[in-house]
Image (tube, rainbow, N blue to C red):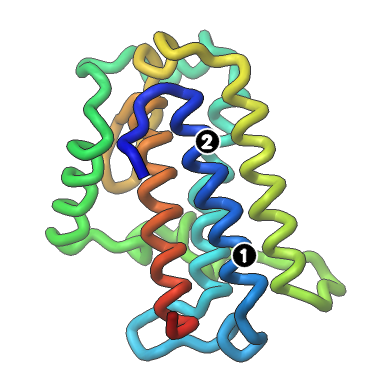
Amino acid sequence: MTTPNTKTELIEQIRQVEAALAQTVENITADQFDTAPSESWPASGYLKHMILSTKPFVKALSLPKEQMQSMFGPPDHASKPYDELVADYKGRIAGGIRAEDFNAVTPVTYRLPEGTEDVKAYLLDVWHDTHNRLVQALESWNGEELDSHQLPHPALGLITLREMLFFTLHHNTLHWHDIQQVRGQ
């Protein structure tokens, strides 16, 4: 994987990870999907966590640009390169920050619709729908706007939209690998 920078490169790589993660989940057993080794989430937990952490970004991208600017102001820094943003995030993780510190992005808060019989299929549908909506919302944003608007990130503070895309790619890749480990690949 090359280091992404443009909106097109980011979308392409986010889509690649979306598809690869879905393929991994489709190929695991129900037991692997719902069971985790100690100190880890099951694959279902990782998938719920990623959906919960991506949906607010999609919602924010759908806001009018002026509203986002008035809510969070303009960035006080240029967008960091992908590798630098990932290093900052890893530093925060090494410093002890965990998803469990933020109730809105922990898997225990995910509610399934009543009557959902095939949880794995349902979550995969939501996973794909969330990414379809992400790509659709990005259509109205150009490269300059990705650098001139910002959003709050629970661990990183205010980051530009481009940095949020970097984070989304890294986060999805990280947890795709976690699911592969849960599966025993």
- Disc ID at residue 33: none
Residue in the image at 34% along x and 31% along y: 163
Where residue 63 sits in the image (x, y, percent)? 59, 21
Disc 2 packing (10 Å; few <14; some 14–19; many ≥20): some
Instruction: Return the residue nearer the eye: 142 or 40.
Output: 142
Q: Which residue is mark 2?
A: 12
Residue in the image at 63% along x and 26% along y: 137
Question: Dividing the image into 4 quarters, which one contains the N terminus?
Answer: top left
Residue 169 occupies quadrant: top left
Residue in the image at 74% along x and 57% along y: 125
Tell me the SS state at disc 1.
helix
Where residue 54 sits in the image (x, y, percent)? 53, 46
Question: Dividing the image into 4 quarters, which one contains the C terminus?
Answer: bottom left
Where residue 80 sits in the image (x, y, percent)? 22, 27
Where residue 30 sits in the image (x, y, percent)? 66, 86
Task: Please give left or right for residue 184 compared with residue 18 in the image.
Answer: left
Residue in the image at 57% along x and 73% along y: 44
Residue 27 occupies quadrant: bottom right
Task: Please give left or right for residue 22 compared with residue 2 in the image.
Answer: right
Instruction: Return the residue nearer the eye: 28 or 92.
Output: 28
Tell me the SS state at disc 2.
helix
Q: Which residue is mark 1?
A: 23
Residue 4 occupies quadrant: top left
Q: Earlier in the sequence, mark 2 or mark 1?
A: 2
Task: Please give left or right for residue 63 compared with residue 122 in the image.
Answer: left
Q: Are marks 2 and 1 in contact (CB under 8 Å)?
A: no
Q: Amino acid at mark 2?
A: Glu
Task: Please give left or right for residue 155 compared with residue 20 in the image.
Answer: left
Disc 1 packing (10 Å; few <14; some 14–19; many ≥20): few
Q: Amino acid at mark 1?
A: Gln
Q: Is residue 129 above or below residue 185?
A: above
- Name, please, the residue furthest toward the right: 115
